[in-house]
Image (cartoon, helix red, strand yellow):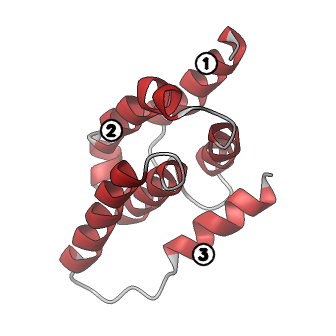
Amino acid sequence: MTNETVETIKRYIGNRFFEVHPFKANSAGIEAFSKLYHITRKQYPEFIINNIINEIDELLKEKTIKHCFSCHMKLLIFAMLICESKLPEQGRVYKNKIFTLSMQRRRSNDRDYFMEVRSAIKNYA
C-alpha cells in the first residue's frame, strides 16, 4: 500500500464534503466512489476500516447528504458494496440503514438506486 493510494482515497472521499449533491448521476462523486470500490477489492479489511469506513461514516452525517434521499441512499449502497466481501458485518450495518431509510421514505420512488450504483461501478472499472 502506497501513500499515494491513501491520498487518492482521502481525496475521493474528502471532495464529497464540499459538493451539494455529490452522488447525482454521472457526477464526480459517482465516478470517485466507483473507483474507490475497485481500489478496495485489493485491500485488507484493516486498511478499509482505517482509511475508508470512518470517513464514509462522517460523510453520512453531513447535512447535504442527509437532506437528499438520493445521495444518502447511493452513499449507503456504495458503503455496503465496499464492505460486503471483506467486512460482511459492517456491510450488514449499511444494508440495515438502507432498509430503514427506504422504509422512512414517504412517497413512492421507482428509482433503482442499487442498479444506478452497480452500473456506475461497472462503467468506471
Tell me: residue 45, above or below residue 85.
above
- Tag 1: Cα neighbours inside 10 Å, few (<14), some, or many (≥20)? some
- State which tag comes first along the sequence, 1 or 2: 1
Rendered location of residue 123, percent (x, y): 79, 60
- Left or right of 114? Residue 67 is left
- Left or right of 50? Residue 40 is right
Q: SS at mark 1?
A: helix
Q: Amino acid at mark 3?
A: Met
**Residue labelled with disc 1:** 6
Looking at the rendered image, the quarter that the N terminus falls into is top right
**Residue labelled with disc 3:** 115
Q: Residue at x 21, y 82 (%)?
A: 106
- State which tag comes first along the sequence, 2 or 3: 2
Q: Is residue 68 visible?
A: no
Total marks placed: 3
Q: Amino acid at mark 1?
A: Val
- Tag 3: Cα neighbours inside 10 Å, few (<14), some, or many (≥20)? few
Frontmost of labels 3 and 1 is 1
- Left or right of 27? Residue 65 is left
Q: SS at mark 3?
A: helix
**Residue labelled with disc 2:** 57
Rendered location of residue 4, percent (x, y): 71, 13
